[in-house]
Image (cartoon, rainbow, N blue to C red):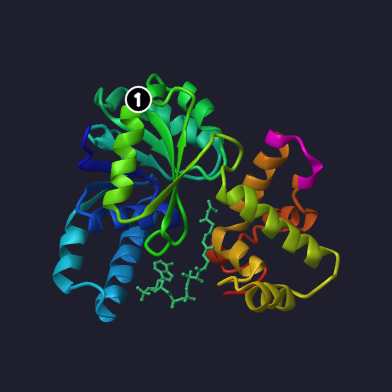
């Protein structure tokens, strides 16, 4: 099956980045969000990111115009039903994702493939709730999507070969590199990355180092492009906590216990860059 039209659910930092790379690669994209303001902000973000590429001579004004022309927006989930592929990129909460797939079901054409950009949840469990588990899989992009080269592909227990190959071909057309991860909590990248971030937060919590010194240590001492606390703010502390909690419950090992300081920051609403405050103050 060849994919030409893609519906993206969620216009947040992942959803707008995914819509961006799809449109640049020539796909017709319908970007959906229940929040009209977030939709508008997402589209403006794509325009600004493409504009920066034009300014740096990496793309042309014409290519930017064409890409933006391939994205339409909607607040109605049923408008995605005619797409060849759906990429769900909503909040990292299982109940939210399930509700989206339930509500999409009546409007889907028979061949539509469903994918989720979940960073940690069970693909098999999400797929099992739908009426098409053979046409369901995980398609996990990294943030910022237009920059990061990697995409994780995750099969559920019932994912068909046709589904996998169609999605794999899409990733290739996006010019990204795919790795295949088994369906275990948080897959590969987040199984390694988020416990490292959690450990950095413990390092802060126990007073081993300051925010700046912890980040500086990993930037200059391990050549990471961002320090772990800066990266946590960038990913979103709510997302980091959600992923740690999935690892903790899914693997039943105390080594994945979310740091109490991470929990406290999330309870305070200090979710990182997106709200202006996390380990750093962006206001
Ligand atoms: N959206 C789109 N493009 C962006 C961007 C954004 N938010 N931020 C930066 N860019 C682009 C810039 O336009 C620039 O593009 P060109 O090279 O084409 O000109 C390029 O990225 C480099 O940007 P800068 O020079 O301004 O900044 P930098 O060198 O400091 O790099 C960074 C920024 C790429 C974000 C870098 O700091 C980095 O790689 N950080 C680590 C990111 C990371 O680890 N991501 C994975 C997070 S985990 C995840 O996503 C999984 C999950 O499920 C939680």
Residue highlighted by disc 1: 105
Asked whether 252 falls inside the magenta stretch, the response is yes
Name the element at disc 1.
helix
As displayed, is residue 20 above or below residue 245?
Answer: below
- The x, y position of residue 174, in whole percent, is 29, 53
- The x, y position of residue 95, in whole percent, is 54, 33
As displayed, is residue 127 above or below residue 55?
Answer: above
Asked whether 78 falls inside the magenta stretch, the response is no
Image check: 18 left or right of 223?
A: left
Q: Residue at x 74, y 49 (%)?
A: 258
Image check: 269 left or right of 261?
A: left
Q: In this picture, which residue range is highlighted in magenta?
A: 250-255
Residue 282 figure quarter: bottom right
Q: Is residue 74 visible to us here?
A: no
- The x, y position of residue 27, in whole percent, is 21, 49
Q: Count the marks.
A: 1
Q: Residues within 10 Å of mark 1 (few under 14, many from 20)?
A: some
- The x, y position of residue 257, in whole percent, is 77, 46
Secondary structure mostly seen in magenta is helix
Q: Residue at x 58, y 58 (%)?
A: 236
Front residue of 32/177: it is: 177
């Amino acid at each position: 099956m060849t994919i030409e039209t893609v519906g993206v659910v969620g216009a947040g930092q992942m959803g707008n980045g995914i819509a961006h790379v799809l449109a640049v690669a020539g796909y017709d994209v319908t970007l959906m969000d229940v929040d009209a303001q977030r939709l508008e902000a997402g589209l403006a973000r794509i325009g600004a990111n493409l504009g920066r590429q034009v300014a740096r001579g990496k793309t042309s004004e014409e290519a930017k115009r064409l890409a933006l022309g391939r994205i339409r927006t909607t607040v109605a989930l049923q408008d995605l039903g005619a797409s060849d592929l759906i990429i769900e990129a909503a909040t990292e909460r299982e109940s939210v994702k399930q509700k989206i797939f339930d509500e999409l079901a009546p409007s889907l054409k028979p061949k539509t493939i469903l994918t989720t950009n979940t960073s940690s949840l069970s693909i098999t469990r999400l797929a099992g709730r739908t009426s098409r588990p053979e046409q369901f899989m995980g398609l996990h992009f990294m943030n910022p999507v237009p920059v990061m080269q990697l995409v994780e592909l995750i099969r559920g227990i019932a994912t068909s070969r046709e589904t996998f190959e169609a999605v794999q071909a899409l990733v290739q057309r996006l010019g990204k590199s795919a790795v295949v991860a088994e369906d275990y909590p948080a897959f590969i990248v987040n199984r390694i990355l988020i416990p490292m971030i959690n450990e950095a937060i413990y390092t802060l919590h126990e007073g081993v180092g300051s925010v700046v010194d912890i980040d500086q240590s990993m930037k200059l001492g391990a050549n990471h492009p961002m320090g772990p606390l800066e990266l946590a703010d960038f990913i979103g502390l709510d997302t980091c906590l959600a992923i740690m909690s999935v690892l903790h419950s899914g693997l039943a090992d105390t080594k994945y216990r979310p740091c109490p300081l991470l929990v406290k920051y999330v309870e305070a609403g200090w979710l990182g860059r997106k709200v202006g405050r996390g380990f750093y103050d962006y206001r």
